[in-house]
Image (cartoon, rainbow, N blue to C red):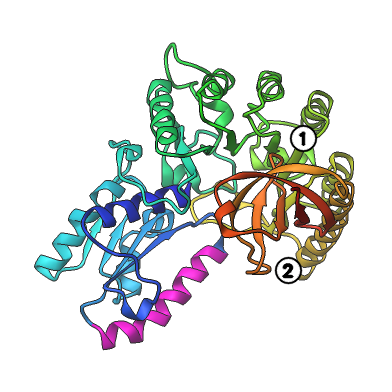
Amino acid sequence: MNKYDSERIAGLLCKYKAQYEENTQNADVIVFNTCTVRESADDRLFGQLGNLRGVKEEKPDLIIAVGGCLAQSYGEKLLLKFPQIDIVFGTHNIERFPYLLKSRILTGNRVIELKNESTYDISCLPSSREKSFSAWVSIMHGCNNFCSYCIVPYVRGRQSSRPSSQIIKEVKNLVSSGVIEITLLGQNVNSYGKDLADDLNFPKLLKSLSEISGLKRIRFITSHPKDFNSETIKVVAESERLCNHFHLPLQAGSNKVLKDMNRGYKKDKYLRLTEEIYNMIPDASITTDIMVGFPTETEKDFLETLDVVEKVKFDNAFTFIYSPRPGTKAIKFNNNFSHKEKMNRFKRLVEKQTSISQMKNDRLIGKSFNVLVEDFSKKDKEMLMGRTKTNKIVNFNGDSNLIGRIVYVDIISAKAHYLIGKLKL
C-alpha cells in the first residue's frame, strides 16, 4: 500500500512537470512516504532526516516533505523535532500535496495538513509506476481489525471498500495501456465488500477480474486468516489468471497469544485453512508473517509457533521482533523477558524457516515454469529476474528485451530465497 501511495505522489509531481532525480544532492524536493508499523521504520526516517540537515543548510531552498503513516501518527511533533522539514501531510490527503508544495514555495512558511478520514479516492490520481506491465490496484482502504499490536487502523482509518464497478473499470483501463499483471491491495482483502450494500464479495470480485481479456496474472495481498475462506481458494483453483500464491499472516501459533493479539482465529483454524489450500491447489505456495517477542509470549507459546511452521512448511516467512507502537493496546502489556531471549527465539525461527525454504526450493530443481520477467537481478546485473505464479524469484540469463514478457524457464539450482534458471528455448 505504501508503494501504491508513493506512485500516486510521484504521479502528481510529474503532472506538474517535476522530473525524477537520482542524486539527492541535486534534488529540489525530497518526499518521504513513511511507514510506522515497526519502530525500525521510524528510526530509518529519523536517520535520513538527520543526514539531510547539512544538505538543507547548504541548500536552503531544498524542500523536504514527510507524508504517510508516520506523518499521520506524529503530526506536528515532526516539525518541532526536525526544523529541516518543510511539509507534513498524512495518509488521507495525498491529493492535496501539490497545493501544500505550492503554498510552501509561495509563502515560505512550513506547512502541515492532516485529515482524520479520506474524502477522496486516490485511485483517480495520476500514477508514476515502476513497471509499465505491472500495477498495484487498491480495492479498499483502512482496517477494522484492531489487532492489539497494530497502528494501521489509527493512521489509515476504518475499512472502506471501493465499489467493484470502479475497480473493474480501472483494471480494464490498465490492461488497455499494456498492463498484464495486477496486484490487488488491501489491509484485509478477504473482508472486501462487507461495508458495501449489494456489491461483490472478494471471491466474486476475483472471478470478475479474471474474466478481463488481456490480463495474464492477478495477485492479492494481504489476506487475513479470520476472514479467509474456501470460496476464495476455489476461485483461485479454477482460474489460470489468478496466481496460486497465498500470503496468509500467522503472527503466532499459540492460541493464548493470538487472543492477546486480537487476531480472531485459533491455531487449528489456521492449520485447516492451509491444509485446504494444499488439498485444492497442490502446487500452491504459502508465505506468512510471524512475530517473535510479543509481550505475553512464553517459551511454550513460541514452541507452538515453531510447530505451525513445521506443519505448514511455508515457502517463505517475513519474520520480525515485536515493536511497541504508541496508541495500541499491546503497549500496556507487561514485557516479562529480555531482548536477548527475543533474539534467541528470532534466530531459531529464522533458522527453521530458512531450512524449510531451501528444502521446498530444492524440490523445484529440474522443473520448468512460466516467469514474468521484471528487471535485472539484484544479485547479478548480468542476469534477469522474474517471478513464477507462486511468487518465486527466478534469476536467469537473457536479453533486456524480455523484460515485461512471460517466458518459460528451467530451474537448474536453488537458494533458500530464490531460484536460478535457464531460459527454455
The image shows residue 236, relative to residue 369, as above or below, that is above
Which residue sits furthest front?
Answer: 425
Dot 2 corresponds to which residue? Answer: 339
Residue for point 27% across, 57% down: 13
Viewer-nearest of labels 1 and 2? 1
- Quadrant for residue 334, please give it: bottom right
Q: Residues within 10 Å of mark 1 (few under 14, many from 20)?
A: many
The x, y position of residue 262, in whole percent, is: 64, 37
Q: Quadrant of residue 161?
A: top left
Toward the top, the furthest residue is: 198
Q: Could you say which disc has been placed on residue 284 in the image?
A: 1
Left or right placement of residue 368 versus residue 118 in this view: right
Q: Nearer the viewer, residue 71 or 318?
A: 318
- Which residue type does callout 2 highlight? His
Q: Residue at 34% x, 56% y: name it.
A: 10
Is 46 magenta? The answer is yes
Name which residue lies at 87% across and 51% down. Answer: 356
Q: Is residue 239 left or right of residue 109?
A: right
Q: Which residues are magenta?
A: 40-59
Element type where label 2 sits in the image: helix
Q: Whole-percent x and y of residue 368? A: 80, 43
Q: Nearer the viewer, residue 281 or 372?
A: 372
- Which badge, 1 or 2, is on the more N-terminal residue? 1
Residue 382 appears left or right of 194: right
- Residue 352 x, y percent position in the rendering: 87, 56
Disc 1 residue type (three-letter):
Ala
| Residue appearing at x 68%, y 22% in the figure | 229
**At numbered mark 1, what does the secondary structure look like: helix, strand or loop?**
loop
